[in-house]
Image: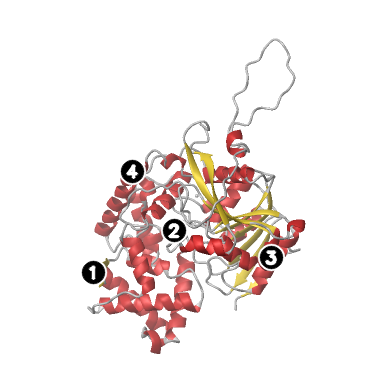
Amino acid sequence: MRRAALALTTAALALTALPATATARPATTAPDPLARYHQQRLAWKSCVLGPEDTTGKELRQAGARCADVTVPLDYSNPGGRTITVAISRIRATDTDRRVGPLLLNGGGPGGPSLGDPPWVRKAMKDVAARYDVVGVDPRFIGRSTPLDCRWPTGSAWRGAGADRAGFDRMTAFAKDLAERCRGNAGDVLPHATTRNTARDMDVVRAALGERRISYLGYSYGSYLGEVYTTMFPGRTDRVVLDGVIDPDRYGPRLLRGVERANRHALEGWASWAAAREATYGLGRTRGEVLAAVDRVRKASARTPLRLGDHRLDGHVMPMVVFNGLSQHNDAAYGDFAQGVRDMLRASQGQRVTPSPWLAGVLEFTLTGADSPYGSAQTAILCGDGTAPRDPEVYWRDVQRGRAQDPLFAPVTHNINPCAFWDRPRERPTTIRDDLPALLVNATGDPRTDHDGARTVRGMWPSSRLVTLSGADQHAVYGVYGVPCVDDTVNAYLATGRLPAKDVDCAAR
């Protein structure tokens, strides 16, 4: 997930059988109902949208070009309304040894990936020259046709609060978000699903003129990869899934079960901050730092904390902590430590101008600036699977979880807009039994825990798992910076051969 980050035919459509006749006719190939999409000619153009477009400028500097791919809004009615999916491409330079396109998804759901090719190519090193590296903004995300529920927030996720009154406020909040989506984007909501995103990927494949694609997906992108390879068998070459989701645990309540990993990550950060007490002033021991976090939690539950123009209450404070715990490095730890220091000072009644990282999280959570992100993320999760409709189910789960973890469990078990969403149009995808893919996961990943990666490894005996041990890190390849992981992935991308056995790598 971002700042903070759900019985199958192999064809997009089932063709209606022709009526039987008395006269036998030669067998013919059924027409392709998506032919006009598969055979479209892409108009490649500059990726720069204007003078303030930093993403476009980075793509241009890396040699990328961009295009809009037309896809049907509703794959059951391919002759109806259309939308566009924005893509970028940096073409292979080693054309004699070209492998083909490598499509990217950076996670979410709701995260754009159009801007990812430059940094992914850097991670790929020499093997990048053999691929067309293709960034894709999935349907309703980024530069693709948007979905915006006009929310006052960029995230549907909150803590449940300290008592039943707080939970009831969150129930009303979740219901209001669902109603805003129904009122402002109801015509497209049923089509915001992972299965339709996978169908779009296959249109992109065909529009690029390719029989097969390779794929690199992070976090939610791992689930998208599982769905695509299931829906379109035989159309992938080399598949890398980093931050692997157990498909049986994916859905509107996918955060349940990550409390222990987040607590472990919080404790690791607290030890780091304690070693830098002179800089951040949060305590000299891990216990003292954790106690400071808990004081902020309790203070925000009593009275909202003033942080610049924002007010931080007991529902949002746990989300700030959750957002601070996905990257295991000094820069991310330092940003989070400054944020905790700001919240601690505010809890003591001081006037505080929040640090840049904290200001960004508050802007994301407490204003509508990133409404399209939260809208699309929630629409996909709710469109992929059903959630309990009775608020009492969530309340009981929150209360049970709170006894073990009063900070994270009220977030991971809390009610969300999917409780008030229309039922999905399609059943969840039953993921294929096996795929020769390369799986990557850190043991301490606080978003997609290592157990999920091991589960998928067991589902797919021909796959291999690369484990980064000793890091509380979400997304490893090209992000964390360990040669053991990056070199293993690059060797697979270069040769198409998986390691002979699973690979264990140590954190730096």
Q: Label 2 amino acid?
A: Gly
Which element is circle 2 on? Answer: loop
The residue indicated by pointer 2 is 50
Tell me: 188 left or right of 18: left
Q: Toward the viewer: 52 or 398?
A: 52
Q: Which residue is mark 4?
A: 184
Which residue is denoted by mark 3 in the rendering?
Answer: 490
Corner quadrant of residue 344: bottom left
Q: Residues within 10 Å of mark 2 (few under 14, many from 20)?
A: few
Residue positioned most to the bottom:
278
Q: Secondary structure at mark 3?
A: helix
Quadrant that contains the C terminus: bottom right
Q: Residues within 10 Å of mark 1 (few under 14, many from 20)?
A: few
Q: Circle 4 — which element? A: helix
- Frontmost of labels 3 and 1 is 3
Q: Is any atom of residue 406 visible in this view?
A: no
- Of label 4 and label 1, which has the lower sequence position? 4
In the structure shown, which secondary structural element does the residue marked by tag 1 occupy? Answer: helix
